[in-house]
Amino acid sequence: MSRTLGAMLLALMLASCGGGYKSAPSNLDNACSIAQQRPKFMKAFKATQRKWGVPVSVQMATIYQESKFRSDARTPFRYVLGVIPMGRQSSAYGFSQALDGTWDQYRKETGNRRAKRNKVRDASDFIGWYMNQSHERNGIALNDARNQYLAYHEGQSGYARGTYKRKSWLVRVAADVGARAKTYDTQLRNCRSYRY
C-alpha cells in the first residue's frame, strides 16, 4: 500500500471517529441518560450554573425545546408557492437557537469573541447570560423556567410588554418547558451518573 493511500485511510478513520456530537443523545426525556451519554454537556451546564446562577435543569429544558440537543439545528425553510425555497424563517442556529444579532451582542458583551452556537459550552453560557439579563431587567427568578423561556422567546422588552399573552401556543410551550425543567431537576437529584 502506498504512503498516500495509507495516509488517506488513516485520515478517513480519524474523521469517522468524530471530535464531537453531531446527533442528539437518545432518550431526551431522561436527564440521567443525557448525563451518562454526554458528560461534556453536563460539565458545561454546571459551569454555566456556577457563573450565571441558572440551574442545570432550566438550561437543559431550554435546549430541549429549542434544538432537541442538536448542535446544527436550524429553523425550517420558507417556501413560495409551496416549492421554491426562499431562505430560512430566521437566523436561529445551534443548541440555543440564538439569532445572529443576539449572538453577536453576547460575544461583544462577554468578550467571548470565538464562541460558536454549535458548541454546547458556548450555547449554555449564552443561555446563562441571557437569562441573567432577564432576571436583572424583568425580575424573573433564575429557576423560573416558564417565564425565563417566555423572555427568551419574546426578548426582554417583549416580555415586559406582555407580547406572549396574545400567543396561547407560546404560553403552552413555556408551561411545557417549566414542567420539563422540574422533571429534569428531580431526575438529576436521583441520578447515579450525575453529582448534583
Image (cartoon, helix red, strand yellow):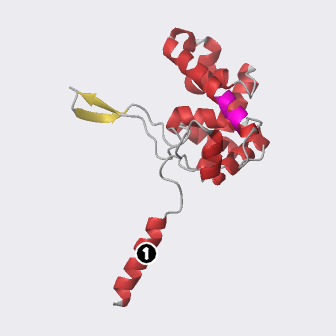
**Considering only vertical position in the picture, is 2 above or below 193?**
below
What x and y, as percent, mark residue 40?
65, 53
Residue at the top extreme of this rendering: 166
What x and y, as percent, mark residue 167?
50, 13
**Considering only vertical position in the picture, is 116 above or below 58?**
below
Q: Dot 1: within a 10 Å radius of its alpha carbon, few (fewer than 14), some, or many (20 or more) residues?
A: few
Task: Name the residue located 73 percent from the left edge and 47 percent from the top edge.
Answer: 192
Residue at the bottom extreme of this rendering: 2
Quick check: 85 left or right of 32?
left
Task: Name the residue located 51 percent from the left edge and 43 percent from the top edge.
Answer: 94
Q: Tell me the kind of residue under disc 1.
A: Ala
The span picked out in magenta is 181-187
**Considering only vertical position in the picture, is 159 above or below 33?**
above
Quick check: 17 left or right of 8?
right
| Residue 61 part of the magenta segment | no
Residue at the spot of label 1? 11
Q: Can residue 139 be spotted in the picture?
A: yes
What x and y, as percent, mark residue 151?
62, 23
Q: Which quadrant of the view contains residue 98?
A: top right
Task: Name the residue located 77 percent from the left edge and 47 percent from the top edge.
Answer: 195
